[in-house]
Image (spheres, rainbow, N blue to C red):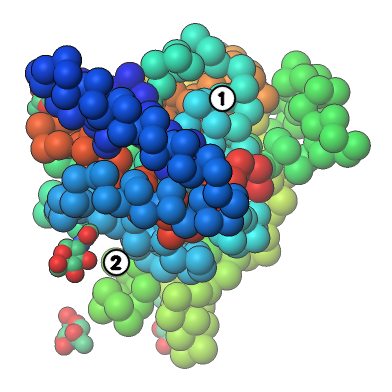
């Protein structure tokens, strides 16, 4: 898409100097041009004499009159963006329509002041923080002089709007989401772009958040040494562990039996081979409480919660999707146990950087027993230790206060490209200009730096 050098975005300051708004077309004769300039100067002179209160109302009127009547914006993205940005309230979460509107402008992130309170408690807060940090330090990624303003929609909830099995994208425009479909479902049908995970950011942020010095007093090498000391390989239990709750699908909504729940299948495997797989539920939710209420707890395994660090007592840790993507995958790759990853239905942007049998061991619910046998086989311990080393070295490069913000910005750049590709032939500049102007008129001063 060909972008104009700058959007006409500031009604208050640029109304009289906006060539498209006031001056005649470029092709007109010089005399006409001069006439217009005189007219313009006369208008400015009149306004200059008047009080500032009067001036502000007249300015708006002048813009409206001089501007081409708003073409009715048919761009669904912009229509949605305008609607969400114009609403003083942000209702989160709310399925795949839990939209958070932001504007990237002059390498700054803007949002509505009246949305800040909700955002400060939302998961999106982490992404906004990463973006703000990234934008401060990534001149190389964004050229300030040529940066157009970009409207952004991110989805706060678990939903991405994409349904893998039927290749249905319920949202008709590009948006930022926590996860996207894996490549096995094909590409090009889902317009979601993956954000940088809030959990990676938050866990490191909160773990090291004393006195604003989070991250700075912290190195992965120290953490890895500590893991080695506390959970040395030679004392690990020779089993693959998993703990979690009965998420995946709700009982009533999906009308499935407990045995059809992926996580229940995993626990069943553990009942078949308790010598190598130790998988158990720590809580029953989403309608599966009935399993306990009706006394069927002998059909599955119920156990106590195991703190994250203590999972390292086991040689292997199993990771499996729940309601959506497994946000603990990044953290598991920082432990000193091997990660067995059950073929995911939802992935994050960094999955493309990870290789099976290099960073983790891939498995399915069908072959998990064989895979666990292989992983735990004493003859394969060197290979497993090498996988842990690669995983840790990936972790060390990825989970840092510098890299996460950089990734947040580069995902944002991908998002911008997706938006431009989706709308590059349908008058984007003009539509965005109109919408932006209307938003500014409607919400005025409430568009502010988005530091939440
Ligand atoms: C515009 O869209 C077409 C079709 O989607 C694409 O091939 C092209 O690369 C796009 N151009 C730009 C500048 O994004
Ligand atoms: C489009 O036009 C209709 C009818 O004139 C109006 O109700 C609607 O608000 C317009 N939409 C936009 C986005 O301007
Ligand atoms: C749920 O599934 C069972 C068995 O497949 C079927 O008999 C029943 O009618 C279904 N109930 C609903 C509400 O769809
Ligand atoms: C589970 O317990 C119920 C009720 O005590 C019993 O009828 C059933 O046979 C048991 N199932 C298994 C698999 O042990
Ligand atoms: C197990 O399944 C996964 C996912 O489909 C696959 O990548 C892996 O190669 C399989 N492993 C074995 C040993 O069959």
Query: Can residue 106 be seen here?
Result: yes
Asked if residue 160 is positioned above or below residue 103 in the image, the reply reads: below
Task: Name the residue that disc number 2 marks.
Answer: 260
Who is closer to the viewer here, 359 or 74?
74
**Which image quarter has ligand 2?**
bottom left
Q: Position of residue 100 (x, y in %)?
A: 45, 54
Q: Quadrant of the N terminus?
A: top left
> Which residue position holds label 1?
135
Horizontal and vertical percent position of residue 104:
46, 34
Q: Residue at x 72, y 51 (%)?
A: 307
Residue for point 81% across, 36% down? 208
The numbered mark at residue 233 is none
| Image x and y of residue 24, in percent | 18, 29
Residue closer to the observer: 290 or 221: 221
Q: Number of marks in the image?
A: 2
Badge 1 or badge 2: first in the primary sequence = 1
């Amino acid at each position: 898409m060909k972008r104009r050098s700058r959007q006409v975005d500031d009604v208050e300051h640029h109304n009289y100097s906006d060539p498209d708004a006031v001056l005649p077309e470029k092709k007109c004769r010089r005399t006409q041009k001069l006439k217009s300039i005189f007219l313009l100067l006369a208008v400015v002179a009149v306004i200059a004499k008047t009080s500032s209160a009067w001036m502000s109302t007249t300015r708006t009127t002048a813009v409206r009159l001089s501007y081409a009547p708003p073409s009715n914006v048919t761009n669904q993205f912009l229509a949605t963006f305008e609607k969400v940005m114009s609403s003083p309230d942000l209702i989160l979460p709310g399925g795949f329509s839990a939209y958070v509107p932001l504007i990237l402008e002059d390498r700054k992130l803007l949002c509505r002041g009246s949305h800040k309170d909700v955002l400060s408690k939302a998961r999106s807060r982490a992404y906004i923080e990463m973006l703000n940090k990234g934008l401060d330090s990534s001149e190389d990624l964004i050229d300030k002089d040529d940066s157009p303003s970009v409207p952004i929609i991110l989805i706060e909830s678990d939903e991405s709007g994409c349904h893998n099995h039927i290749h249905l994208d319920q949202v008709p425009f590009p948006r930022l989401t926590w996860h996207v479909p894996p490549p096995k479902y094909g590409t090009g049908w889902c317009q979601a772009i993956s954000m940088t995970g809030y959990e990676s950011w938050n866990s490191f942020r909160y773990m090291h958040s004393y006195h604003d010095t989070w991250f700075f007093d912290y190195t992965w090498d120290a953490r890895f040494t500590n893991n080695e000391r506390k959970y040395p390989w030679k004392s690990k239990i020779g089993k693959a562990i998993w703990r979690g709750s009965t998420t995946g699908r709700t009982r009533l909504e999906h009308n499935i039996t407990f045995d059809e729940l992926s996580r229940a299948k995993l626990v069943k495997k553990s009942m078949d081979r308790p010598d190598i797989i130790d998988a158990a539920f720590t809580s029953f939710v989403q309608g599966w409480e009935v399993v306990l209420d009706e006394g069927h707890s002998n059909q599955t395994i119920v156990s106590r919660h195991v703190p994250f660090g203590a999972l390292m007592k086991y040689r292997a840790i199993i990771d499996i999707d729940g309601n959506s993507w497994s946000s603990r995958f990044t953290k598991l790759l920082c432990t000193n146990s091997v990660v067995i990853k059950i073929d995911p239905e939802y992935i994050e942007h960094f999955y493309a950087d990870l290789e099976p049998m290099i960073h983790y061991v891939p498995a399915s619910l069908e072959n998990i027993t064989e895979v666990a046998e292989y992983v735990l086989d004493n003859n394969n311990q060197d290979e497993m230790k090498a996988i842990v080393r690669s995983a840790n070295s990936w972790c060390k490069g990825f989970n840092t206060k510098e890299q996460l913000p950089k990734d947040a910005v580069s995902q944002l750049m991908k998002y911008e490209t997706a938006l431009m590709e989706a709308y590059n032939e349908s008058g984007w500049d003009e539509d965005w200009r109109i919408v932006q102007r209307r938003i500014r008129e409607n919400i005025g001063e409430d568009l502010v730096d988005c530091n939440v």
